[in-house]
Image (tube, rainbow, N blue to C red):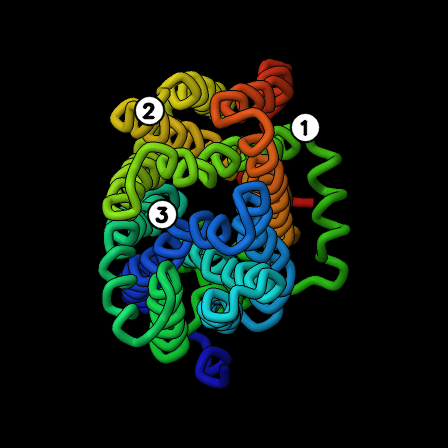
Amino acid sequence: MATDLAAPLAAPDVVPIQRRTLRLLFGTQIIGGIGVTIGVAVGALLAADIAGTAVAGLVSSAAVVGGALLAVPVTRIMTTHGRRPGLVVAYLTGAAGGTLVVLAAVTRWVPLLCLGMLLFGGGSAANLQARYAAVDLATPARRGRQLSLIVWATTIGAVAAPNFASLADGVTSGWGLPTLAGPFAFSAVAFVLAAGTILGLLRPDPLLTARRLAAAGSPATPAGVASAPTTRRGAGMRAAWSAVRARPPARLGIVAVAVGHLVMVAVMVMTPVRLHEWHSDADLLRVVGLVLSLHIAGMYALAPVAGWLTDRIGRRAVILGGVGLLLAACAVAGTAGHHTARLSTGLFLLGLGWSGTMVAGSTLLSESVPAGIRPSVQGLCDLTMGLAGAVGGTVSGFVVEAAGYPVLAMFAAVAVVPLVTLALRPVPVGAPDEEE
């Protein structure tokens, strides 16, 4: 960290630093996306094999809970020490989780599986937090595009990853590992690689650099960098919650992100189990990989379009559009029967709906709170999103066990009704750089 706290940089150095930061984040997002998505692709199947279908959603949601809970310490580390140590801690936690899941598959011990999946969520926490590192040194005119670039980078790793699950499983079966354990071994390796890359190459730290430039008051500092948040006593989760509660636009933003994630996770985690009903073990991983690749493409590949529409037609309009896509996804997936192509279409629409609520909701939330509290509010948003997804994932297994996948899709559709009511309410939008 001594390198980051060296003598003030000349303002022209910001451009190459930002360019290098974006290239590095782009690469690690691909690696991290592979690690996260390989686990997502087979997590429910492994849990169902060890603990049964009803518990599969609970075990899968443990990763979501882990990612949500890690947002708190990771945000605290970043606020105090910068982006680099926070991202490294999150990735290494995910690697430890992947290792424990492999051990749980060998021992078939459910508590160890739950703990492993809980820690595995560190990979997701790192990938989500990386999008904020992309805009620490960005100018307002390029902020949206540069954030979207990092979100889009996840697509490359995430779309390809499920199709590597079968390959990973085949390779590790020769090592004596049980079926479905291999993908998590590969995930652990990917997370360690991402952590090592961030630790060695994310220098200088973008957040600390932005703070140093802001403190220096350089006239050539890129517009917007001067409002980079500084470390502030009391700027924790309680202060973040107070800031959100006091601002209607911020409340709408955080609810949009949370509800969109709840619906997406609830339907997505049980889709591999649904596919297992009519596909043999021989081709199950291949089909699951294809369906989830389409779903993740919907989540990430068109994120820049969602960002452009958010700026073009407004935040609430895109949130409502995302809600419409989520409803369409539940209708298509819930009535797909044993038609893989139709179920794939439903999962693609589910990803698009999530992208709309996430991008527009995150944008509305971030611009509706003062800069000094913004990092904590962003951490609160990821925490709330993760906990909402955990609720959806936990309930989904029991619903499918008791009433079936179509009923799950119906319940997921009903869950968006409160968001529609809130989004249609007149909401004054605060200035992007509102200060206390």
Q: The residue tagged with tag 2: helix, strand or loop?
A: loop
Q: How crowded is mark 2: few (under 14 residues within 10 Å), some or many (20 or more)?
A: few
Q: Which of 192 and 336 is in front in this view?
A: 336
Report x, y in % for residue 227. 54, 53
- Name which residue type carries label 1: Pro
Task: Mark yes or no: residue 276 visible.
Answer: yes
- Name the residue located 63 percent from the left edge and 34 percent from the top edge: 250
The nearer-to-camera label among 1 and 3 is 3
Task: Mark yes or no: residue 301 visible.
Answer: no
What residue is pinned by disc 2? 338
Q: In this view, does 433 lie above or below 102?
A: above
- Name the residue located 39 percent from the left edge and 40 percent from the top edge: 272
Q: How far apart are marks 1 and 3 (CA)?
A: 26 Å
Q: The residue tagged with tag 1: helix, strand or loop?
A: helix
Mark 1 vs 3, N-terminal side: 3
Label drawn at residue 248: 1
- Name the residue located 76 percent from the left edge and 43 percent from the top edge: 242
Q: Nearer the viewer, residue 303 or 186?
A: 186
Q: In this view, does 409 lie to the left or right of 150?
A: right
What residue is pinned by disc 3? 151
